[in-house]
């Protein structure tokens, strides 16, 4: 290629644009292939679900079907006994999908496949088969729960490992369950979105600390595991800082943890308490939120949200405390199940001690 062509800015931009279009076409092709395969699996599962009821096929039904299909398609590995059973489970889990109008038309594999969002109920065709098998295993026939995880997978582009993590931590049961006053303090749409980002309880099982931990130790552990903490908080959270300094009048104040939520376009003040919730926590949190609104909130930002994450709470007391506030706040508990025995805590080396030891070994070599 001539240097003249390489130096041409419009040509360079065209090459970039063609590259982007090619990658997008690859993604669309992969989605379409996956969509077609899963619609085929769904239809086979529907057939098997009906046929299995007929006693004439006998107890060796799956083995016979697997053998016969493999004879016809020896190069295809999708017709194992296990996979055929998953096809049946797949159909039975999402069979409600067939009850909507024109379901038969949608099940045909045609050029004009539904796009993302055309129908929230058929998005299970858009995630990989391995993801679907994990959801089938974990959701035990619960259609609403399964659809929840399908949509979260699409929304957040979860890998199978991340999906499995959230299935194991019961995200469906915890999502949006914090006690809040968002419906009273925010516009309807913002209120729904804000509620959706909350959980109760927050699962901190990724931490390993001593059972009689104090507040500082918990915060240190969360910061040491910031990536996992952000994953537990949910999609859209960006970490701003810990012990963020705010001047309020003549005093210095420090926010435990400050985040920014990209979806809601607002700051989120998080106060962590290693004790039961106290109504006085609302006063401290509200003061910090107002200060953030005055000192950090920019043009276009939504009002700051506040969240108290505490070891335990009385739900009635929490609700009353929230009703008394005009600031958008929420209250959640947290769970930790992994603890270091107390006698080991003092004997564990610090990071500094490990680094010093490694340094000595390096010098002696």
Image: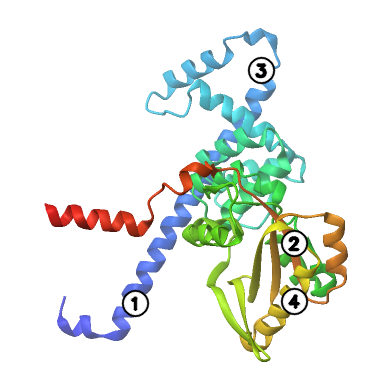
Residue 113 appears in the picture as rendered: no
Rendered location of residue 248, percent (x, y): 67, 87
Quadrant of image for the N terminus? bottom left
Residue with the mark numbered 2? 331
Tell me the residue at 61%/53% (across/down).
152
Q: Nearer the viewer, residue 195 or 211?
A: 211
Within-10-Å neighbours for mark 2: few <14, some 14–19, many 20+: many
Cα–Cα span, label 2 and label 4 = 13 Å
Within-10-Å neighbours for mark 1: few <14, some 14–19, many 20+: few
Disc with the residue nearer the chain's start (1 vs 4):
1
Cα–Cα span, label 1 and label 4 = 52 Å
Residue 115 sits in quarter: bottom right
Label 3 sits on a secondary structure element that is loop
Are the residues tagged 1 and 4 within 8 Å (C-beta)?
A: no
Tell me the residue at 66%/42% (across/down).
146
Label 2 sits on a secondary structure element that is strand
Q: In the rendering, which numbered label is found on residue 338?
A: none
Q: How many marks?
A: 4
Residue 215 appears in the picture as rendered: yes
Cα–Cα span, label 1 and label 3 = 56 Å
Are the residues tagged 3 and 2 within 8 Å (C-beta)?
A: no
Cα–Cα span, label 2 and label 1 = 51 Å
Residue with the mark numbered 1? 14
Disc 1 versus disc 4: nearer the observer: 4
Label 1 sits on a secondary structure element that is helix
Q: Nearer the viewer, residue 133 or 209?
A: 209
Disc with the residue nearer the chain's start (1 vs 3):
1
Residue with the mark numbered 4? 286
Are the residues tagged 2 and 1 within 8 Å (C-beta)?
A: no
Against 109, is 234 above or below?
below
Residue with the mark numbered 3? 52
Disc with the residue nearer the chain's start (3 vs 2):
3
């Amino acid at each position: 290629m001539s240097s003249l062509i390489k130096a041409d800015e419009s040509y360079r931009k065209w090459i970039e644009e063609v590259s982007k279009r090619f990658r997008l076409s690859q993604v669309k092709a992969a989605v379409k292939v996956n969509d077609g395969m899963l619609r085929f699996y769904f239809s086979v599962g529907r057939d098997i679900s009906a046929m299995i009821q007929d006693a004439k096929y006998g107890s060796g039904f799956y083995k016979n079907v697997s053998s016969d299909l493999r004879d016809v398609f020896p190069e295809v590995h999708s017709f194992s006994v296990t996979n055929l059973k998953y096809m049946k489970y797949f159909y039975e889990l999402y069979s409600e999908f067939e009850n909507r109008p024109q379901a038969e038309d949608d099940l045909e594999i045609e050029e004009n496949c539904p796009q993302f969002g055309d129908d929230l109920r058929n998005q299970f065709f858009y995630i990989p088969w391995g993801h679907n098998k994990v959801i089938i295993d974990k959701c035990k026939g619960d259609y609403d729960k399964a659809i929840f995880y399908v949509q979260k997978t699409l929304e957040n582009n979860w890998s199978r490992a991340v999906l499995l993590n959230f299935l194991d931590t019961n995200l469906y049961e915890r999502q949006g369950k914090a006690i809040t006053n968002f419906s009273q303090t925010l516009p309807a749409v913002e209120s729904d979105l804000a509620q959706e980002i909350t959980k109760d309880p927050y699962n901190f099982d990724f931490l390993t600390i001593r059972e009689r931990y104090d507040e500082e130790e918990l915060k240190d552990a969360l910061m040491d595991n910031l990536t996992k903490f952000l994953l537990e908080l949910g999609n859209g959270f960006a970490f701003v800082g810990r012990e963020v300094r705010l001047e309020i009048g003549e005093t210095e104040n420090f926010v435990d943890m400050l985040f920014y939520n990209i979806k809601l376009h607002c700051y989120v003040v998080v106060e962590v308490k290693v004790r039961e919730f106290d109504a006085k926590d609302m006063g401290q949190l509200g003061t910090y939120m107002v200060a953030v609104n005055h000192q950090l909130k920019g043009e276009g930002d939504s009002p700051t949200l506040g969240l108290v994450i505490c070891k335990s709470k009385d739900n009635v007391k929490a609700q009353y405390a929230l009703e008394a506030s005009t600031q958008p706040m929420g209250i959640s508990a947290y769970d930790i199940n992994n603890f270091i025995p107390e006698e080991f805590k003092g004997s564990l080396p610090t990071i500094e001690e490990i680094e010093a030891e490694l340094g000595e070994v390096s010098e002696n070599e």
